[in-house]
């Protein structure tokens, strides 16, 4: 084994302090405020300063206790309270896509607007890992078979199609590898080449994109009778024998197609669900068995929806039982995402938050309690959940939507908001990042005014 040393520019995370400082009656409040601000700026600084010989250390969190120590070191300060730590950039709004890294522990990606955020500590803190000006992020897909590789799909404004961006180092650097004149609805990494291969479900068909110099997307034949058939979703499955299957769901209620030959052109067959509006596909593994799940969209905002469908994958052989319907107690409207936690199925919905079921024990969807912590749009309905994801260890669930990212540590029973910009105890920092001071907001009062 060997290692390589990679030298790159440090990145900076801006943090601001908000606090109230109480001084003695005899103190000049303006002078104390100026000195405290100088101490904060010189301490929360990446470079050496008169109060910090080395500058802020790489990766060291900023804690409220640090602020107390900085302020109390100024003569005349009696006490400090109302301390808040604030950061400038977090995925606090319009999170459309979420994913956990398959190889890097505690690493997550969240797309919010035109910025891809990354967390290296299970959502305790976030840093921007990619910016795509003017192009909102629609998908982020870490590679399940190659460490470090991550793909992002952005949508160009005014119906200009989609752009493809790829990182080979967990989001440290990005390369725009393709621009398509039509929309990419879903992306899955293939597992049948020495080079990384993306499968793209688009409004104009299914495309394969091999990441080689000068490479470009190549359209695959799925339905020979309708080569321009658009697709909503694509999923890749690998069984215990190494057989790779690729499934795609067709637009215009065209059903689901399956290739048991690595998704090669001309090897797809229709496997059902014609007449159903399948927008999501995901693969669940149960020991040696693999199941394909399809999530259905509702016909309108008042439609309660149909839930999900499941089919066991058996290579070139069709499962004799066909598709199973899981729609009992589903009142979530459209299904916008599917994830798995052990044998449990989690579904992001338009109306009912993140629903779940365990097919081996029950066939009824369980909706979360309205007090679970997910944001509500009225007393009985949740805000739409655009994305749901779990980590490979099966210990965390994350849900994203219009109000940011929410995390559950108890298998989806209770959620907490983890993408806020204000902290009471500490602000974390990635190992290769440094803090820099923003515009601090310090109020200084004397002890009489503080009582």
Image (cartoon, rainbow, N blue to C red):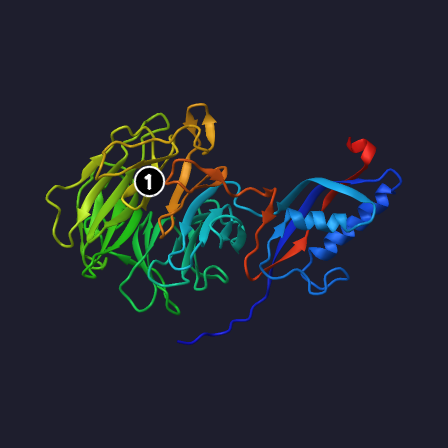
Q: Nearer the viewer, residue 142 or 367?
A: 367
Q: Nearer the viewer, residue 74 or 360?
A: 74
Q: Is residue 373 above or below residue 112?
A: above
- Location of residue 436 (image quadrant): bottom right
Q: Quadrant of the C terminus?
A: top right
In the rendered image, residue 239, in percent from the top left (x then y), is placed at: 21, 57
Which residue occupies the extreme front position in the image?
78
In the rendered image, residue 170, in percent from the top left (x then y), is placed at: 45, 60
The residue lying at 42 percent from left, 47 percent from top is 98
Q: Nearer the viewer, residue 149 or 433?
A: 433
The residue that mark 1 highlights is: 346
Question: How packed is label 1: few (under 14 Cα within 10 Å), some, or many (20 or more)?
Answer: many
- Location of residue 79 (image quadrant): top right
* Any part of residue 231 in sight: no
Which residue occupies the extreme right position in the image?
26
Q: Quadrant of the N terminus?
A: bottom left
The residue lying at 24 percent from left, 36 percent from top is 276
The residue lying at 26 percent from left, 48 percent from top is 284
């Amino acid at each position: 084994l060997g290692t390589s040393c990679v030298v790159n520019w440090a990145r900076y995370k801006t943090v601001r302090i908000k606090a109230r400082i109480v001084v003695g009656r005899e103190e000049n409040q303006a002078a104390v405020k100026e000195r405290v601000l100088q101490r904060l700026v010189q301490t929360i600084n990446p470079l050496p300063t008169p109060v910090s010989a080395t500058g802020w250390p790489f990766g060291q969190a900023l804690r409220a206790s640090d602020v107390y120590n900085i302020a109390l070191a100024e003569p005349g300060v009696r006490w400090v309270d109302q301390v808040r730590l604030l950061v400038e950039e977090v995925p606090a709004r319009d999170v459309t896509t979420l994913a956990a890294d398959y190889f890097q522990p505690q690493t997550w990606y969240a797309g919010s607007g035109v910025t891809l955020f990354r967390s290296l500590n299970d959502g305790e803190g976030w840093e921007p890992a990619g910016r795509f000006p003017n192009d909102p992020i629609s998908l982020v897909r870490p590679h399940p078979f190659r460490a470090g590789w991550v793909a992002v799909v952005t949508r160009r404004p005014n119906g200009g199609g989609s752009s493809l961006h790829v990182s080979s180092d967990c989001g440290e650097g990005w390369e725009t590898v393709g621009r398509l004149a039509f929309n990419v609805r879903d992306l899955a990494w293939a597992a049948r080449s020495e080079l990384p291969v993306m499968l793209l479900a688009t409004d104009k068909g299914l495309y394969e994109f091999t990441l080689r110099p000068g490479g470009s997307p190549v359209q695959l034949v799925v339905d020979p009778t309708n080569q321009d058939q658009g697709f909503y979703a694509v999923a890749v499955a690998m069984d215990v024998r190494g057989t790779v299957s690729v499934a795609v769901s067709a637009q215009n209620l065209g059903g689901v197609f399956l290739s048991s030959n690595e998704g090669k052109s001309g090897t797809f067959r229709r496997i059902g669900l014609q007449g159903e509006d399948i927008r999501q596909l995901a693969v669940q593994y149960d020991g040696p068995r693999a199941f394909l799940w399809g999530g259905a969209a509702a016909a309108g905002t008042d439609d309660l929806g149909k839930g999900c469908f499941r089919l066991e994958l058996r290579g070139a052989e069709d499962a004799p039982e066909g598709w199973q319907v899981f729609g009992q107690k589903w009142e979530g409207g459209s299904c916008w995402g599917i994830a798995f936690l052990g044998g449990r199925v989690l579904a992001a919905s338009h109306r009912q938050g993140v629903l779940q079921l365990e097919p081996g024990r029950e066939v009824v969807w369980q909706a979360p309690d309205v007090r679970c912590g997910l944001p509500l749009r009225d007393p009985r309905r949740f805000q739409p959940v655009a994305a749901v994801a779990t980590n490979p260890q099966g210990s965390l669930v994350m849900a994203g939507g219009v109000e940011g990212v929410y995390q559950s540590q108890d298998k989806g029973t209770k959620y907490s908001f983890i993408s806020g910009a204000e902290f009471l105890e500490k602000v974390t920092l990635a190992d290769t990042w440094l803090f820099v001071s923003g515009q601090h907001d310090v109020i200084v009062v004397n002890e009489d005014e503080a009582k």
